[in-house]
Image (tube, rainbow, N blue to C red):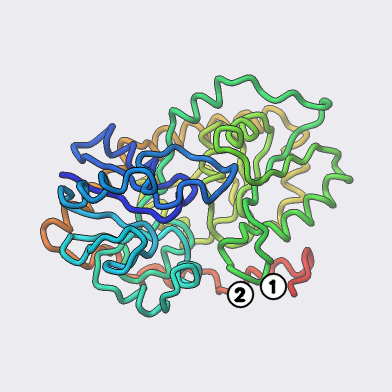
Protein backbone atom coordinates (compact mmCIF):
# COMPACT_ATOMS: atom_id res chain seq x y z
CA UNK A 1 0.00 0.00 0.00
CA UNK A 2 1.34 3.44 -0.95
CA UNK A 3 0.24 6.45 1.11
CA UNK A 4 1.25 10.03 0.32
CA UNK A 5 1.02 12.54 3.18
CA UNK A 6 0.44 16.21 2.35
CA UNK A 7 1.03 19.07 4.81
CA UNK A 8 0.98 22.82 4.41
CA UNK A 9 3.17 23.14 7.56
CA UNK A 10 5.18 20.61 9.63
CA UNK A 11 2.54 20.51 12.43
CA UNK A 12 5.10 20.11 15.22
CA UNK A 13 6.65 17.12 13.48
CA UNK A 14 3.65 14.81 13.91
CA UNK A 15 3.33 13.88 10.19
CA UNK A 16 7.02 13.03 9.74
CA UNK A 17 7.03 10.85 12.86
CA UNK A 18 4.01 9.01 11.47
CA UNK A 19 5.63 8.51 8.06
CA UNK A 20 8.84 7.27 9.67
CA UNK A 21 6.86 4.79 11.79
CA UNK A 22 4.83 3.50 8.84
CA UNK A 23 7.98 2.87 6.79
CA UNK A 24 9.84 1.26 9.68
CA UNK A 25 7.19 -0.93 11.26
CA UNK A 26 4.56 -1.68 8.60
CA UNK A 27 4.18 -2.71 4.95
CA UNK A 28 2.90 0.77 4.07
CA UNK A 29 5.15 2.80 1.76
CA UNK A 30 4.73 6.36 3.00
CA UNK A 31 6.14 9.70 1.84
CA UNK A 32 5.57 13.16 3.28
CA UNK A 33 5.34 16.40 1.30
CA UNK A 34 5.62 19.71 3.14
CA UNK A 35 4.50 22.82 1.29
CA UNK A 36 6.31 25.17 3.69
CA UNK A 37 8.72 23.19 5.91
CA UNK A 38 10.47 26.29 7.27
CA UNK A 39 7.41 28.18 8.55
CA UNK A 40 8.26 27.42 12.21
CA UNK A 41 11.62 29.18 12.01
CA UNK A 42 13.92 27.75 14.70
CA UNK A 43 11.53 24.90 15.50
CA UNK A 44 13.06 22.59 12.90
CA UNK A 45 11.82 19.02 12.40
CA UNK A 46 12.88 16.13 10.20
CA UNK A 47 11.82 16.44 6.56
CA UNK A 48 11.10 14.16 3.63
CA UNK A 49 10.03 16.09 0.51
CA UNK A 50 10.09 19.87 0.18
CA UNK A 51 7.42 20.79 -2.39
CA UNK A 52 9.20 24.01 -3.35
CA UNK A 53 12.19 21.95 -4.54
CA UNK A 54 10.60 18.69 -5.74
CA UNK A 55 7.19 19.53 -7.18
CA UNK A 56 7.56 17.16 -10.17
CA UNK A 57 8.29 14.24 -7.85
CA UNK A 58 5.17 15.08 -5.85
CA UNK A 59 2.95 14.83 -8.92
CA UNK A 60 4.45 11.42 -9.70
CA UNK A 61 3.84 10.21 -6.15
CA UNK A 62 0.21 11.37 -6.27
CA UNK A 63 -0.40 9.19 -9.32
CA UNK A 64 1.07 6.12 -7.62
CA UNK A 65 -0.57 6.63 -4.21
CA UNK A 66 -3.38 4.34 -3.09
CA UNK A 67 -4.39 6.90 -0.45
CA UNK A 68 -3.56 10.59 -0.01
CA UNK A 69 -3.38 11.51 3.68
CA UNK A 70 -4.08 15.25 4.12
CA UNK A 71 -3.07 16.80 7.44
CA UNK A 72 -5.44 19.55 8.60
CA UNK A 73 -7.53 21.06 5.79
CA UNK A 74 -6.35 20.95 2.18
CA UNK A 75 -8.83 21.70 -0.61
CA UNK A 76 -9.22 18.78 -3.00
CA UNK A 77 -9.03 20.95 -6.13
CA UNK A 78 -7.85 24.50 -5.50
CA UNK A 79 -4.90 23.78 -3.23
CA UNK A 80 -1.36 25.26 -3.05
CA UNK A 81 0.07 22.03 -4.45
CA UNK A 82 -1.86 22.51 -7.72
CA UNK A 83 -3.01 18.89 -7.56
CA UNK A 84 -6.52 17.59 -8.28
CA UNK A 85 -7.28 15.19 -5.44
CA UNK A 86 -10.93 14.58 -6.33
CA UNK A 87 -10.02 11.37 -8.16
CA UNK A 88 -7.99 9.95 -5.26
CA UNK A 89 -8.94 8.22 -2.01
CA UNK A 90 -8.35 10.96 0.58
CA UNK A 91 -8.27 10.82 4.37
CA UNK A 92 -8.09 14.00 6.43
CA UNK A 93 -6.32 14.13 9.80
CA UNK A 94 -6.84 16.98 12.24
CA UNK A 95 -4.25 18.04 14.81
CA UNK A 96 -6.14 20.90 16.44
CA UNK A 97 -9.63 22.07 17.23
CA UNK A 98 -12.08 22.92 14.40
CA UNK A 99 -12.06 26.67 15.06
CA UNK A 100 -8.29 26.82 14.69
CA UNK A 101 -8.38 24.78 11.47
CA UNK A 102 -11.22 26.91 10.13
CA UNK A 103 -9.44 30.21 10.71
CA UNK A 104 -6.23 29.07 9.06
CA UNK A 105 -7.94 27.36 6.11
CA UNK A 106 -10.58 30.04 5.52
CA UNK A 107 -13.28 27.36 5.50
CA UNK A 108 -16.41 27.33 7.74
CA UNK A 109 -16.32 24.85 10.62
CA UNK A 110 -19.51 23.21 9.34
CA UNK A 111 -17.85 22.30 6.04
CA UNK A 112 -14.85 20.80 7.87
CA UNK A 113 -16.96 18.69 10.25
CA UNK A 114 -19.41 17.50 7.57
CA UNK A 115 -16.87 16.74 4.87
CA UNK A 116 -17.45 13.33 3.26
CA UNK A 117 -13.79 12.30 3.24
CA UNK A 118 -12.80 9.83 5.97
CA UNK A 119 -11.45 11.67 9.00
CA UNK A 120 -8.87 11.01 11.70
CA UNK A 121 -8.17 13.18 14.74
CA UNK A 122 -5.25 13.12 17.14
CA UNK A 123 -6.50 11.68 20.44
CA UNK A 124 -6.10 14.86 22.45
CA UNK A 125 -8.67 17.42 23.63
CA UNK A 126 -10.14 18.06 20.19
CA UNK A 127 -11.13 14.40 19.73
CA UNK A 128 -14.49 15.34 21.23
CA UNK A 129 -15.07 18.06 18.64
CA UNK A 130 -14.91 15.89 15.48
CA UNK A 131 -17.98 13.61 15.53
CA UNK A 132 -16.98 11.64 12.41
CA UNK A 133 -13.26 11.25 13.05
CA UNK A 134 -11.47 8.21 14.47
CA UNK A 135 -9.06 9.06 17.33
CA UNK A 136 -5.44 8.12 16.57
CA UNK A 137 -2.26 8.55 18.63
CA UNK A 138 0.32 11.29 18.28
CA UNK A 139 3.37 9.07 17.79
CA UNK A 140 6.82 9.57 19.31
CA UNK A 141 10.18 8.93 17.70
CA UNK A 142 11.94 7.02 20.47
CA UNK A 143 15.24 7.26 18.59
CA UNK A 144 15.13 11.01 19.29
CA UNK A 145 14.29 10.30 22.93
CA UNK A 146 17.28 7.94 23.22
CA UNK A 147 19.60 10.49 21.61
CA UNK A 148 18.48 13.13 24.13
CA UNK A 149 18.97 10.68 27.01
CA UNK A 150 22.50 10.00 25.79
CA UNK A 151 23.41 13.68 25.40
CA UNK A 152 25.24 15.60 28.15
CA UNK A 153 22.74 17.23 30.50
CA UNK A 154 22.67 20.99 30.70
CA UNK A 155 24.74 22.28 33.59
CA UNK A 156 22.69 23.66 36.48
CA UNK A 157 23.41 27.10 37.79
CA UNK A 158 23.11 25.76 41.33
CA UNK A 159 21.83 22.74 43.22
CA UNK A 160 18.20 23.81 42.98
CA UNK A 161 15.62 21.57 41.31
CA UNK A 162 14.65 22.53 37.79
CA UNK A 163 10.98 22.75 36.77
CA UNK A 164 10.45 22.78 32.98
CA UNK A 165 7.51 24.18 31.03
CA UNK A 166 7.35 24.58 27.23
CA UNK A 167 4.22 26.59 26.36
CA UNK A 168 5.03 26.88 22.61
CA UNK A 169 2.77 29.87 21.92
CA UNK A 170 1.50 33.00 23.63
CA UNK A 171 -2.24 32.51 23.13
CA UNK A 172 -4.30 34.54 25.69
CA UNK A 173 -6.13 32.53 28.34
CA UNK A 174 -9.59 33.36 27.03
CA UNK A 175 -8.85 32.28 23.45
CA UNK A 176 -8.32 28.92 21.74
CA UNK A 177 -9.08 26.87 24.83
CA UNK A 178 -6.83 23.92 24.04
CA UNK A 179 -4.05 25.80 22.28
CA UNK A 180 -3.24 27.87 25.37
CA UNK A 181 -1.65 24.83 27.07
CA UNK A 182 -2.85 26.66 30.18
CA UNK A 183 0.27 28.83 29.78
CA UNK A 184 -1.03 32.21 31.05
CA UNK A 185 -2.27 30.80 34.37
CA UNK A 186 0.60 28.34 34.74
CA UNK A 187 3.30 30.96 34.24
CA UNK A 188 1.69 33.29 36.77
CA UNK A 189 1.46 30.57 39.41
CA UNK A 190 4.96 29.21 38.73
CA UNK A 191 6.34 32.73 39.12
CA UNK A 192 4.71 33.03 42.54
CA UNK A 193 5.82 29.58 43.65
CA UNK A 194 9.40 30.05 42.48
CA UNK A 195 10.06 32.75 45.05
CA UNK A 196 8.36 30.75 47.80
CA UNK A 197 9.80 27.30 47.11
CA UNK A 198 13.19 28.25 45.63
CA UNK A 199 13.54 26.25 42.41
CA UNK A 200 14.88 27.01 38.94
CA UNK A 201 12.13 27.61 36.37
CA UNK A 202 13.03 26.66 32.81
CA UNK A 203 10.48 28.08 30.37
CA UNK A 204 11.28 27.91 26.67
CA UNK A 205 9.71 28.41 23.24
CA UNK A 206 10.75 28.14 19.60
CA UNK A 207 13.73 25.81 19.99
CA UNK A 208 14.84 23.18 17.49
CA UNK A 209 13.20 19.93 18.49
CA UNK A 210 16.45 18.19 19.49
CA UNK A 211 17.36 21.06 21.81
CA UNK A 212 13.94 21.07 23.45
CA UNK A 213 14.34 17.36 24.25
CA UNK A 214 17.69 17.99 25.91
CA UNK A 215 16.16 20.82 27.97
CA UNK A 216 13.45 18.45 29.21
CA UNK A 217 15.96 15.66 29.83
CA UNK A 218 17.90 18.08 32.06
CA UNK A 219 14.85 18.96 34.18
CA UNK A 220 13.80 17.40 37.47
CA UNK A 221 10.06 18.03 37.00
CA UNK A 222 8.07 18.83 33.86
CA UNK A 223 4.77 20.68 33.61
CA UNK A 224 2.36 19.67 30.83
CA UNK A 225 -1.06 21.30 30.33
CA UNK A 226 -2.64 21.61 33.80
CA UNK A 227 -5.67 23.64 32.72
CA UNK A 228 -7.58 22.54 29.64
CA UNK A 229 -8.18 18.87 30.43
CA UNK A 230 -5.82 17.51 27.77
CA UNK A 231 -2.12 16.91 27.12
CA UNK A 232 0.48 17.79 24.51
CA UNK A 233 3.46 16.26 22.74
CA UNK A 234 5.72 17.99 25.25
CA UNK A 235 4.23 15.92 28.07
CA UNK A 236 4.54 12.66 26.16
CA UNK A 237 8.20 13.40 25.48
CA UNK A 238 8.86 14.31 29.11
CA UNK A 239 7.42 11.03 30.37
CA UNK A 240 9.37 9.05 27.77
CA UNK A 241 12.49 10.84 29.06
CA UNK A 242 11.68 9.56 32.55
CA UNK A 243 10.52 12.82 34.07
CA UNK A 244 7.70 13.16 36.64
CA UNK A 245 5.14 15.06 34.57
CA UNK A 246 2.20 17.01 35.94
CA UNK A 247 -0.88 17.49 33.79
CA UNK A 248 -4.64 17.74 34.04
CA UNK A 249 -6.57 15.17 32.02
CA UNK A 250 -10.34 15.38 32.39
CA UNK A 251 -12.29 12.12 32.52
CA UNK A 252 -13.15 12.21 28.80
CA UNK A 253 -9.44 12.40 28.01
CA UNK A 254 -8.58 9.61 30.45
CA UNK A 255 -11.24 7.33 28.97
CA UNK A 256 -10.09 8.05 25.40
CA UNK A 257 -6.46 7.29 26.20
CA UNK A 258 -7.27 4.10 28.07
CA UNK A 259 -9.30 2.87 25.10
CA UNK A 260 -6.54 3.83 22.67
CA UNK A 261 -3.66 2.24 24.58
CA UNK A 262 -5.40 -0.65 26.33
CA UNK A 263 -3.97 0.53 29.66
CA UNK A 264 -6.09 0.85 32.79
CA UNK A 265 -3.85 3.60 34.18
CA UNK A 266 -1.96 6.61 32.85
CA UNK A 267 1.46 8.02 33.84
CA UNK A 268 0.63 11.72 34.20
CA UNK A 269 0.53 13.11 37.73
CA UNK A 270 -3.06 14.02 37.05
CA UNK A 271 -4.22 17.17 38.82
CA UNK A 272 -5.52 20.61 38.01
CA UNK A 273 -3.31 23.67 38.30
CA UNK A 274 -5.03 24.62 41.56
CA UNK A 275 -3.41 21.57 43.21
CA UNK A 276 0.10 22.39 41.98
CA UNK A 277 1.39 24.28 45.06
CA UNK A 278 1.03 21.34 47.46
CA UNK A 279 2.20 18.80 44.90
CA UNK A 280 5.29 20.81 44.04
CA UNK A 281 6.29 21.04 47.71
CA UNK A 282 6.35 17.23 47.96
CA UNK A 283 8.13 16.69 44.65
CA UNK A 284 10.84 19.27 45.25
CA UNK A 285 11.92 17.83 48.59
CA UNK A 286 11.57 14.13 47.75
CA UNK A 287 14.22 12.88 45.31
CA UNK A 288 13.15 9.25 45.65
CA UNK A 289 9.55 10.12 44.79
CA UNK A 290 10.66 11.99 41.67
CA UNK A 291 12.84 9.07 40.57
CA UNK A 292 10.08 6.52 41.11
CA UNK A 293 7.52 8.57 39.22
CA UNK A 294 9.96 9.18 36.38
CA UNK A 295 10.87 5.50 36.09
CA UNK A 296 7.20 4.52 36.03
CA UNK A 297 6.46 7.10 33.34
CA UNK A 298 9.31 5.94 31.12
CA UNK A 299 8.36 2.26 31.50
CA UNK A 300 4.69 3.02 30.74
CA UNK A 301 5.59 4.99 27.63
CA UNK A 302 7.80 2.18 26.30
CA UNK A 303 5.02 -0.35 26.86
CA UNK A 304 1.81 1.51 26.04
CA UNK A 305 3.00 4.34 23.75
CA UNK A 306 5.17 1.93 21.82
CA UNK A 307 5.38 3.23 18.25
CA UNK A 308 5.34 -0.21 16.64
CA UNK A 309 2.04 -1.04 18.35
CA UNK A 310 0.32 2.33 18.06
CA UNK A 311 1.03 2.84 14.36
CA UNK A 312 -1.35 -0.08 13.74
CA UNK A 313 -4.24 2.34 14.39
CA UNK A 314 -3.31 4.13 11.17
CA UNK A 315 -2.85 0.94 9.16
CA UNK A 316 -6.30 -0.26 10.24
CA UNK A 317 -7.79 3.06 9.15
CA UNK A 318 -6.13 2.77 5.73
CA UNK A 319 -7.46 -0.76 5.33
CA UNK A 320 -10.97 0.40 6.23
CA UNK A 321 -10.73 3.20 3.66
CA UNK A 322 -9.63 0.79 0.93
CA UNK A 323 -12.67 -1.33 1.81
CA UNK A 324 -14.88 1.66 1.09
CA UNK A 325 -15.52 2.87 4.64
CA UNK A 326 -15.96 6.64 4.89
CA UNK A 327 -17.20 7.08 8.49
CA UNK A 328 -14.20 5.99 10.55
CA UNK A 329 -15.30 6.75 14.13
CA UNK A 330 -15.78 3.50 16.00
CA UNK A 331 -17.00 4.95 19.32
CA UNK A 332 -20.16 7.10 19.13
CA UNK A 333 -19.41 10.74 19.93
CA UNK A 334 -21.92 10.72 22.80
CA UNK A 335 -20.58 7.57 24.45
CA UNK A 336 -18.26 9.58 26.68
CA UNK A 337 -20.08 12.91 26.72
CA UNK A 338 -21.19 12.59 30.34
CA UNK A 339 -17.50 12.56 31.31
CA UNK A 340 -16.59 15.87 29.69
CA UNK A 341 -15.72 18.68 32.05
CA UNK A 342 -18.06 21.60 31.24
CA UNK A 343 -16.34 23.62 28.56
CA UNK A 344 -16.01 26.82 30.58
CA UNK A 345 -15.31 25.22 33.95
CA UNK A 346 -11.57 25.48 33.33
CA UNK A 347 -11.95 29.25 33.50
CA UNK A 348 -13.74 29.27 36.85
CA UNK A 349 -11.21 26.81 38.26
CA UNK A 350 -8.40 29.27 37.62
CA UNK A 351 -10.08 32.56 38.50
CA UNK A 352 -8.02 32.85 41.66
CA UNK A 353 -4.78 32.42 39.73
CA UNK A 354 -5.29 34.48 36.64
CA UNK A 355 -7.62 37.24 35.52
CA UNK A 356 -9.03 36.36 32.09
CA UNK A 357 -9.74 39.40 29.97
Percent from the top left, x then y, of residue 22?
28, 39
Which residue is identified by label 2?
344
Please name whichever residue, 78 or 206, is drawn nearer the observer in this view of the structure: 78
Q: Quadrant of residue 178?
A: bottom right
Residue 139 seen from this side: yes
Say which residue appears at 31% left-offset and 69% top-offset.
Answer: 78
The relative height of residue 310 versus residue 159 in the rendered view (above or below) is below
Callouts 1 and 2 close, C-beta under 8 Å: yes
Percent from the top left, x then y, of residue 338?
45, 72
Percent from the top left, x then y, of residue 351?
75, 70
Dot 2: element? loop
Say which residue appears at 78% left-offset and 70% top-offset.
Answer: 355
Percent from the top left, x then y, of residue 174?
66, 71
In the picture, the quarter occupied by the N terminus is top left
Q: Quadrant of residue 122?
A: bottom left
Say which residue appears at 74% left-offset and 72% top-offset.
Answer: 356
Please name whichever residue, 106 or 344, is drawn nearer the observer in this view of the structure: 106
Say which residue appears at 62% left-offset and 51% top-offset.
Answer: 168
Q: Quadrant of residue 189?
A: bottom right
In the rendered view, does 191 fall on the left or right side of 64?
A: right
Please name whichever residue, 162 or 112, is drawn nearer the observer in this view of the structure: 112
Dot 1: element? helix
Which residue is identified by label 1?
348
Amino acid sequence: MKVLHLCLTPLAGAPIRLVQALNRFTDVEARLVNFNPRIYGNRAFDEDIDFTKQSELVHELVEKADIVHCHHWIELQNNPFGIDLTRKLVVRQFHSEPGFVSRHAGVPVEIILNDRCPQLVVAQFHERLYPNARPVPNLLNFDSIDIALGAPLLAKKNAKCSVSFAPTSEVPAGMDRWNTKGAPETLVLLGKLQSELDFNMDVFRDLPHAQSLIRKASADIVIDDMVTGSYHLSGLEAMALGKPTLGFLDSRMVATLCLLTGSASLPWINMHLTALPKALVHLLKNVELRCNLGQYSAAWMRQYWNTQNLVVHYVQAYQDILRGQTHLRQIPINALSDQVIPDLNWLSLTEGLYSVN
